[in-house]
Image: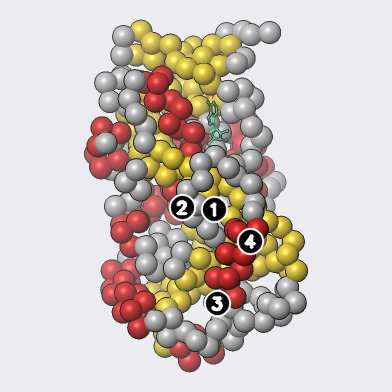
Amino acid sequence: MNKNFNTDVCIVGGGIVGLSTAYFLSLNKISVIVLDPDSIGSHASGFAFGGLSPLGEAGQVDEIISELSVARLGMSIHTEFAKILPELTGIDIQHRFRPALDLAFSDEEAKEAKDQVKWRASEDGYSVEWLEAKEVLDMVPEISNEINGAVFTKGVADVEPYRLMLALTTACEKMGVNIISTKARGLGFDGHTATSVISDRGDIHCNSVVLAMGPWSLNASKWINQKIPIRPLKGQIIRLKSDKVNLQMSVGWQGNYACTKPDGLLWAGTTEEDVGFDDSPSSFGRDSVLASLTKMINGLESAQLIHHTACLRPLSNDGKIILGEVPDTSNLYIASGTGRKGILLGPGMGKITSDIITGSSHNYDLTPFNLSRF
Ligand SMILES: Cc1cc2nc3c(=O)[nH]c(=O)nc-3n(C[C@H](O)[C@H](O)[C@H](O)COP(=O)(O)OP(=O)(O)OC[C@H]3O[C@@H](n4cnc5c(N)ncnc54)[C@H](O)[C@@H]3O)c2cc1C
C-alpha cells in the first residue's frame, strides 16, 4: 500500500555517490531517505575494481586533471572511512595503500608516461618515478620482459567496493538514514522548488532532492525538463586463482589493470563497451581482459577463472562529472558522471553535495561541473 513520507533530503539512487551524500548529511543531523529499487552494491559501486588513484593511470591525464580537487578530497575521505567504517560497522573494507606500476611497451608509450611523471611527482603525498625495464622486472618478475619501462607510484590505494558499500549502508542506517527499496518515477514541484519525489511506494515530501542515479541519470531528464547527458559504459572484471602470480601492487597498461587483492585472487580488468544497459558478463569481455592481462603478466597458464562480473559506468558526454545545483531550481542537486573514477570521487562528491545543502562553506569551484555546460 502506498503511503507518504517526510524527510529533509530525499536521495534518488543508493550507489557510492548517493550513500556518501546520505552519510555526510546524516552526520549533520539532517534526516535522509534514500530510494533504490535494487540491492545495495548490485551495480557498479559494488562491482568496481576499487582502485584509488587520484593521479590517474598512465595515458589518462586529461581524464582526471579537471577533477583533481574532488579526487584529492575523495582520497582523504577514503582514508578516514578506512578507520571509521570498520569501527562503526565491524565490516573490514580492505582499504590498503599499495603502489602502482603503469607499464609502457612502445617508445611512444614510454615518452607519454615520462611526460606525466613531471606533474604527478609534484602532487603532495605521492612518490612518482620512471623505472627502466630491468628495475621493474627486479621488483615484479612476473611482468612481461617486453616492457620498455614503467611509472612507479607510491601513495595510491585500493578498497573492496562491495564491502565498502555494505559498510557505508550499515553506517548510514545506524545514523538514521531510511533506505527504501523502490523506484523513483518523478518529482513534484511548486514553481522552481522540488517538493516531493514520486515513487512506487508513495510520495516522499522533502526540502531538497539529490539525483544520484548513476548510468540511469538520463531517465530524470523529463522530470527536470533538461537533458542529463549521461550514458552507460560497460566494463568487465575477472578474478583468477593463481599459484604462481601474486601481485602486491597494481600493474596497469593503457586502462587495463591487475592486482592480487586481500581475498587472494588476482583481479583484472577491463573493457569499455558502449552497449546500452546490457550488464551481463560476456565471452568477449573475458577474452579481452585475458588478452591485456597476459600481455602484462607471465605465468598465468594454469590460473583458474573464479569470478567474472560486468557493470555500467555513468559516463557524461564530455567525460567529466556533473555536480551541484540543477539550473533553474532552488533545492535540486545532481551528482553523477563519474565514469571510471566513481569509487574514488563518490565520497568527495557526497561531501560537497552535503556541504551545499547544509550551507557549509567549501572551497570547490563547481562551475566546470554544472549541468548548464551542456
Ligand atoms: C568494471 C568497472 C571497474 C571500475 N573500477 C573503478 C575503480 O577501480 N576505481 C574507481 O574509482 N571507480 C571505478 N569504477 C567506476 C565506479 O564503479 C562508478 O563510477 C561508480 O560506482 C558510480 O557510482 P554511482 O553511485 O554514480 O552509480 P551506481 O553505482 O550505478 O548507483 C546508481 C544507483 O541508482 C539507482 N537508480 C537508478 N535509477 C533509479 C530510480 N529511478 N529510482 C531509484 N534509484 C535509481 C540504481 O539502482 C543504482 O543502485 C569502475 C566501474 C566499472 C564498470
* Three-letter amino acid code of the residue under disc 2: Arg
Whole-number angstrom distance, CA of label 3 to CA of label 1: 19 Å
- Residue at 47% across, 71% down: 253
Q: Is mark 2 within 8 Å of ligand 1?
A: yes
Q: Which residue is mark 1?
A: 235
Residue 167 image offset from top left, x and y in percent = 63, 43
Q: Residue furthest bottom?
A: 134
Query: Closer to the camera: disc 2 or disc 3?
Result: 3
Of the numbered discs 2 and 1, the one sitting upstream in the chain is 1
Q: Is mark 1 within 8 Å of ligand 1?
A: yes
Q: Local crowd at mark 1 within 10 Å, few (<14), some, or many (≥20)? A: many
Position of residue 270 in the picture relative to residue 373 (left or right)? right
Of the numbered discs 3 and 4, the one sitting upstream in the chain is 4
- Residues at badges 2 and 1 in contact (C-beta under 8 Å)? yes
Whole-number angstrom distance, CA of label 2 to CA of label 1: 9 Å
Classify mark 3: helix, strand or loop: helix
Q: Is residue 154 visible?
A: no
Q: Which residue is mark 4?
A: 286
- Residue at 43% across, 11% down: 188
Residue 330 image offset from top left, x and y in percent = 31, 19
Position of residue 114 in the picture relative to residue 219 (left or right)? left
Quarter that holds the N terminus: top right
* Three-letter amino acid code of the residue under disc 1: Gly
Whole-number angstrom distance, CA of label 2 to CA of label 3: 22 Å
Residue 66 image offset from top left, x and y in percent = 29, 52
Q: Which residue is mark 3?
A: 295
Q: Which residue is mark 2?
A: 340
Of the numbered discs 3 and 1, the one sitting upstream in the chain is 1
Q: Local crowd at mark 2 within 10 Å, few (<14), some, or many (≥20)? A: many
